[in-house]
Amino acid sequence: MSNDNDSMYNPDYIRIIEKTLTHSLTDYTRIMALRVDLRFPVIDNHGDMPTCFISLDKVMSRFIDSLNAKLKHYQYSKIKHKQRVYPNRLRYVWVKEQSSSDLPHYHCVLIFNKDAHYHLGDYNLDEPSLRTMITSAWYSALQLQLDPITNPTGALVHYPDNGKYCLNQNSMTFEADKAILMDRLNYLAKEHTKIYSSDSRSIGYSLS
């Protein structure tokens, strides 16, 4: 991030991202950070679209709670099948933004122990992949049905190209890799399209 653009970023948000990343690196030698964008469905004016997801202050809490539950269930399933299980504590940062649409959207980074979760998985939402867990957690937060047949990709969840980043503290390039990751995650701290309001949060993050 160049100094010429410093005014375009929220320094408090940058510190939150750095602190969250540090917490993960304190627990795990290798981590995987995943960028995810979460959106709401288009609301029609015919009165037949569910509106419960418009509780904006709670939707991200529901998403994180649902994802954590799915991650734990995935671990229990592996234990049941006598497969090796690695510890994993989900850490995250999300920011709320809104441009010209009626509803906001969210940019997130989800951070995992790389030994526990590395492969995102393909677009088959019938498979118990990390992609399936994240996508279905968002639909659960919206209280919407995710149908792998009629909605096979879970279109309300977007995984940016090249949005998976891995850090290994034993690597000789660790510091350089970390600097590159932070530079990319600073996108979440950009001021453009941010919503600052005393009525609702514009950022959320794991506390420890």
Image (tube, helix red, strand yellow):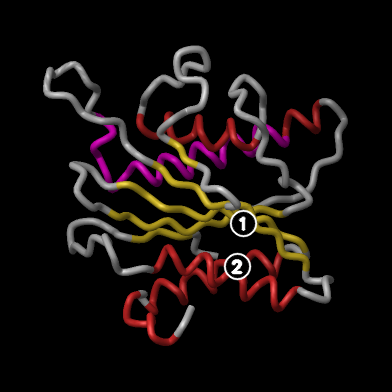
Range of residues picked out in magenta: 52-75
- 43 up-or-down from 197: above or below: above
In the figure, is residue 88 to the left or right of 142?
right
Magenta span: predominant SS is: helix
Q: Amino acid at mark 1?
A: Ala
The disc label shown at residue 33, or none: 1
Q: Residue furthest top?
A: 149
The disc label shown at residue 181, or none: 2
In the figure, is residue 133 to the left or right of 166?
left
In the figure, is residue 31 to the left or right of 4?
right
Task: Tell me what residue is drawn at x 43 percent, y 30 percent.
Answer: 155
Quick check: marks 1 and 2 in contact, CB under 8 Å? yes
**On the image, which quarter does residue 101 sit in?**
top left
- 34 up-or-down from 52: above or below: below
How far, Cα to Cα, is label 1 from label 2? 9 Å
In the figure, is residue 28 to the left or right of 22?
right
Magenta region includes residue 88: no
Q: Position of residue 106 (x, y in %)?
A: 37, 49
Q: Position of residue 144 (x, y in %)?
A: 37, 24
Q: Nearer the viewer, residue 86 or 119?
A: 119
- 156 up-or-down from 184: above or below: above
Q: Nearer the viewer, residue 78 or 47?
A: 47
SS type, badge 2: helix
Task: Tell me what residue is drawn at x 55 percent, y 65 percent.
Answer: 208
Q: Amino acid at mark 2?
A: Leu
**On the image, which quarter does residue 52 sit in?**
top left
Task: Tell me what residue is drawn at x 18 percent, y 42 percent.
Answer: 102
